[in-house]
Structure formats: structure tokens, C-alpha cells
Amino acid sequence: MKISARNQLKGTVSAVTNGAVNGVVAIDIGGSTVKADITMEAIKDLGLAEGVPAVAVIKASNVMFAVGAERVKGLSARNQLAGKVASVTKGAVNGHVVLELVGGNRIMGSVTNEAIEDLGLAEGAEALAVVKSTDVIVGVE
Amino acid sequence: MKISARNQLKGTVSAVTNGAVNGVVAIDIGGSTVKADITMEAIKDLGLAEGVPAVAVIKASNVMFAVGAERVKGLSARNQLAGKVASVTKGAVNGHVVLELVGGNRIMGSVTNEAIEDLGLAEGAEALAVVKSTDVIVGVE
Amino acid sequence: MKISARNQLKGTVSAVTNGAVNGVVAIDIGGSTVKADITMEAIKDLGLAEGVPAVAVIKASNVMFAVGAERVKGLSARNQLAGKVASVTKGAVNGHVVLELVGGNRIMGSVTNEAIEDLGLAEGAEALAVVKSTDVIVGVE
């Protein structure tokens, strides 16, 4: 299945934490780790375990941005991926920002134009893509 | 790619509304329509147009529930799918509710145990699965 | 309105910004403003305009937390609501944190236990509830 989610980061499962109904899967995407909070049913169904190749799937509207190269301290969002802004495209009220991550991956986020202006997001700027772990879907080939 | 998202509702694109950077795709899943607010890039990339077979992909954590059989009036969430509760599984703080939709599809939502109790969600109860259109990913085979 | 979303903050629309397919609605909830990025279809359908009473509906899984009383600078998330932690309930991998906002409202978030520990979220701690504007649903009576 080819899907609309703009972000599909390939990697390897580095850890799985089992809960009662939900669990957390950590995926090493090279240069950074992405954590996904998904159902235990999905973890079993997809056979997710340490060492399994997996893809972190993230919808552009679930990506936020923070300015700078340093992880934002004291923020509950587990995923903060450092990179440089590769492109900014503004629409009527929302715009798309593409970040080139340290490991070479790219991640696109859809945020308000207001945020783009407020943060001064422009080509070349250092920024972090911030994603809540419940907003990450996991795929296996 | 096999993905962790528990809800993958098959249907046919019934309408596409183009915007500047984002667009809205309506998918007729039989018995109801699901609207997805996705990037224009994805709409072009996947060749989404009226009549194209497509899948509405929804992560369980993006599904809310409302009590009753009637669409909740005055709510901005575009997707309200009517059905009957097929099962409820409680965890430590969150639980999973499965709804059998009018058209025969099933949709699973992950909500707080507090909400399950507060709404009296139990097997056989009439309920609506409520999903914001920005939380729907679109897939094509 | 009986819906599983744990957060339903009542207020009045203070501004509407129209876009091509999406728009941004600002709701003054008393003490703070919540911005919602929703479809233009919903804005028209609900008759959202300055002065209209409205409810900001936010699912607990879409709430993040930041430590401290100061707005996190350089973060694209438009909604950062200041308050004090009223309660923390841990589950197996996720927990629920309730924040009492400055204006008297309460907001509940579902985050990982790891984040709760990492941020030292405990009763009485000053914190901000952080919500992306695309994760806010708007309701009218």
C-alpha cells in the first residue's frame, strides 16, 4: 500500500516496551531514534521485536518544529529530531516545512504560517522536528 | 507495507477538494464517507481522483467516541461514523473500543478508561466513531 | 455534547482566519486563547465567527506537557496553556496528567510514563499543556 503520509523513515527496532493495551516501540533510523506509542495488538500482529526492520510513518500534520539544534528541555514529546530546514512552502493559512535530518533523512511538517513566521523558519535554519509518540505509526515490509 | 494503524477502511474516492498546500479527499467506504485532510503533494503523488479505489487509514489513538446514533450537531470533526460497540478492553489507564459500523466495517479507538465509564460504552451500545479529517491518512494499493 | 474527548473548554470565538481548504479559529477560554486549525467546510457549517460561543474539544492523547510557567519559545505548537499539575495517574506505559489552568479550566493529557518521570510532573508542579492547533476540534451548542 502506498500511503499519503509524507514521512516514512526506515530503520530497525531497537527496543519494545510492553504495556497492558498499548506499548512503545523505539526505531533507530540512523542518527536518531523515533518512539511510537501503538497498540499491543499491532506490536504482536507486526511481529515487532528488537532487530526487526521497521518504518516510522508520520503524517505531516503531526509534525511540530522547534528552533535551534538543542533538544527542547522539559517537553513531554518524546521525538525531537535535529536538522536543517531544506524548504518552506506557504499556503493560505498553513505551510509545509521540510527538514533535512542529521542522518540524511527528510521530514515534512504542516504547520500554520503564523508559526513559520514566528519561529523564523527559513532555508538553512537549524531546527528540530517534534513528534508525540502517539502520532507515530509503524510499518514493516 | 503492513502498518500498525488498526483502522484501514477500503472504499472509493468520491470527491477531491484542492487547496494551496493541503486538500480534502472524501472516500466512500460503503454506508458512510470518510474525509481526509492531506497534503496536495500526497494527492498528486497517489493520483487521488474521483473513482479511484483508496483506503482510509486511521490510528486507534485518533478515534474518539460519542454516544447515540445521531450525528453530533455543531462539531467541527468531519467524520462521525455510526455503529454498535462490538467490544471493550480496558488497560491500566487507557482502553480499546471496537465499533461495528453500519456498513459492516469495524473501527477501533483508544480512549481513556474514564471516558469509557463516563459514556457507558459497552457491548451493544449505539455510538459514533468521531475522527478529525487531519487524522486520516489515505492509502492506495 | 457527550463525547469521549476529555477536554471541552468553553469560550467565545475571538478571531477566524480563512484559508483555501483550512482555516484557523481562535477561542478565548478565559485566561487563555486556544487556536484550532480546522476545515473551511466546518467553519461555515458551524457558523463560526467572532463573538460566537464555542467549545475547544481536545483528545487527551493530543496534549503534551512542558515544564515551567513560561511559554516555550521557538516551538511551532500554537497552544501553550499555563497551569499547575492537579493529579498524575500512571498506567503500564502511559499515564494521565491533569493540569489546572490559570483561568480555572482543567486539561487532561495522556503521555508516556517516561515523559512523566523525565519532566518530574507531580502534583503542584508548574507546567504548560501544549497542543498543536490541528489537534483541536471545535464544538458549538
Image (spheres, coloured by chain):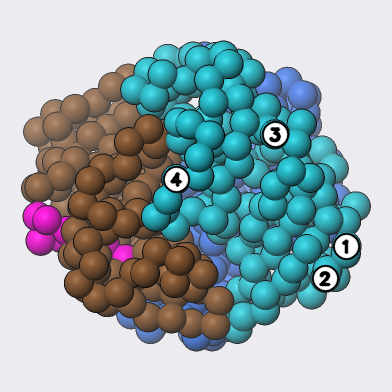
Chain colours: A brown, B blue, C cyan
Quarter of image, res B138: bottom left
Q: CA distance from mark 2 to mark 3?
A: 25 Å
Amino acid, disc 4: Val
Q: Amino acid at mark 2?
A: Ala
Left or right of residue C28, residue A65 in this image: left
The amino acid pointed to by label 1 is Val
Q: Earlier in the sequence, mark 1 or mark 4?
A: 1
Q: Residue at x 37, y 80 (%)?
A: A89
Q: Earlier in the sequence, mark 3 or mark 4?
A: 4
Q: Give the spatial CA distance, label 1 vs label 4.
A: 30 Å
Give the answer, above or below, for where C114 lies relative to B29.
above
**Mark pair 1, 2: CA separation:** 6 Å
Callouts 4 and 2 in the same chain: yes
| Mark linked to residue C49 | 2
On the rendered structure, is A116 left or right of A79? Answer: right
Counting residues from the N terminus, which is met first, the one under dot 4 or under dot 2?
2
Question: Callout 1: residue from which chain?
Answer: C
Instruction: Locate residue C54, reporting x and y percent.
Output: 83, 54
Mark 4, other Cα within 10 Å: few <14 / some 14–19 / many ≥20:
some
Q: Residue at x 57, y 50 (%)?
A: C79
Q: Which residues are magenta?
A: A101-108
Query: For mark 4, what is the residue?
Result: C72
| 4 or 2: mark nearer the eye | 4
**Residue B95, can we see it?**
no
For the residues labelled 1 and 2, say whether their Cβ atoms are less than 8 Å apart. yes
Q: Nearer the viewer, mark 2 or mark 3?
A: 3
Q: Which residue is mark 3?
A: C102
Q: Would you call the spot at circle 2 few (<14 residues within 10 Å), some (14-19), or many (20 or more)? A: some
Marks 2, 3 in one chain: yes
Residue under numbered circle 1: C52
